[in-house]
Image (cartoon, helix red, strand yellow):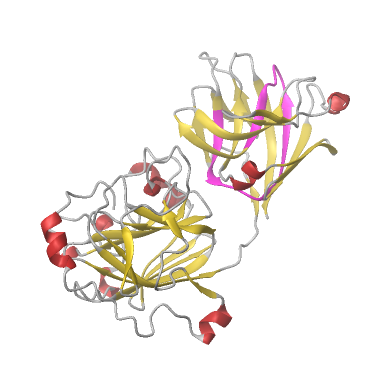
Amino acid sequence: MKNKFRNLSLLCVAGFFGFTACNTAQQNTLTETEKSEGWQLLFDGQTMAGWRDYNGTSLTQPWHVVDGCIQAKGDGSDESGYIVTEKQYENFELSWDWKLSKAGNSGMLYHVVERPQYKVPYVTGPEYQLIDAPNFPDKLEDWQNMGADYAMYIPDTTKMKVNPQGEWNNSKIVFDNGHVEHWLNGQKILEFEAWTEDWHARKNSGKWTNAPEYGLAKKGVICLQDHGYPASFRNIKIKELPRKTAEINLFNGKDLSGWDIYGTEKWYVKDGLLVCESGPDKQYGYLATQNYYDDFDLTVEFKQEADGNSGVFIRSFIEEGVKVNGWQVEVAPKGHGTGGIYESYGRGWLIEAPKDKDNVLKVKDWNTMRILVQGDKVTTWLNGVEMVNLEDEKIGKGQGRIALQIHDGGGIKVLWRNLKLKTL
């Protein structure tokens, strides 16, 4: 829970005593059945192995192991105190036991993205809210309460049974290709679908209005939160679930549903075509998918009616204002490298399209671009001809949106149609 409340240190210290013991008998182990089902422990019951600081390479945050449980010391704040798993997870069942101090406040976050631009994990990762609501001295909004998908979805309180402060509870998150469930002590208390119209409406109208990348990542690290209150965790275990593939039409031919505009340049639909056109400001402009697409096979058709300096960004994110950070598959006038790959705000050209393939581009006619992205490999084709094939570790670690670009300088007009994607 973020920017929550003042650190009630006296309450924390008072509530801390008497709950430090974790009862190590038969804890932090997996049954043979669980092992056969694919469950893995994220905590061995003895060390902090497998955990580190958010955006860090080692563990320096105020966490330690006490009597078989990971324990937050209560020294964290809104800006600090977060630890994350070494490994990223995509689709999973995640189960854990937890116990809070009196008036305690913590959380379990997932799909957390680590980038220097993000100082705290909650601007990207959804949170299963953990809070000692009966003893909390301040009024809680429904979306701040126990078991909520914090600031997004509210649990069914009629199904909630929370053991009293100082006793152990069990929670579980199921994330299965966008289907999300919150469980508490064996009861499902919340269920919703991520990335739907309703989900995006909630994201864009509440706490996350100024956090454009919140909740979009399809994979990320698991994160525990020390929010200034001692908290204990044990039996943290996860079972990974398979990724499902899908075929998606990114443009419906009617409107810009599923896309976000960044900048003041013109994006509109006319005669069933998606049009990008320079506006009076003559600045960079972007049309970005609302959702992330990491591994995919994308085909798009484009026609350059005027200066065609444009591009298709992959695994990109909105850093600030109109600034898009990621990798661009170039769309440009003849002789300027259509099909090559350029890294924005970084290394520049990673690979340019060969000069002897300049004539593959059709001038003032429809062209078909295919972009295959899988892991750290990117291959592009223009009108059936392979343009570049790149293997890059940094791209392999990236994730994000697909975005169309209008270059600055003015005078640009490009038509788009048949933007079809298959997830891999």
Q: Position of residue 139 (x, y in %)?
A: 15, 55
Q: Tell me: residue 262, above or below residue 156.
A: above
Q: Is residue 271 visible?
A: no
- Secondary structure mostly seen in magenta is strand
The count of marks equals: 0
User: Is residue 386 rendered magenta in the image?
Assistant: no
Q: Is residue 417 visible?
A: yes
Compare residues 120 and 172 and report the one nearer the observer: 120
Please name the residue shown 42% across and 50% down the image. Answer: 54
The quadrant in which residue 170 appears is: bottom left
**Left or right: 261 as drawn, with respect to 245:** left
User: Is residue 296 rendered magenta in the image?
Assistant: yes
Q: Position of residue 348 (x, y in %)?
A: 65, 27
Please name the residue shown 29% across and 75% down the image. Answer: 169
Q: Position of residue 215 (x, y in %)?
A: 45, 50
Please name the residue shown 29% across and 53% down the image. Answer: 1
**Left or right: 286 as drawn, with respect to 60:** right
Compare residues 335 and 113 and report the one nearer the observer: 113
- Range of the magenta residues? 286-313
Quadrant position of the C terminus in the picture: bottom right
Q: Position of residue 309 (x, y in %)?
A: 67, 21
Q: Tell me: residue 155, above or below residue 366.
A: below
The quadrant in which residue 13 appears is: bottom left
Please name the residue shown 16% across and 69% down the image. Answer: 17
The quadrant in which residue 355 appears is: top right
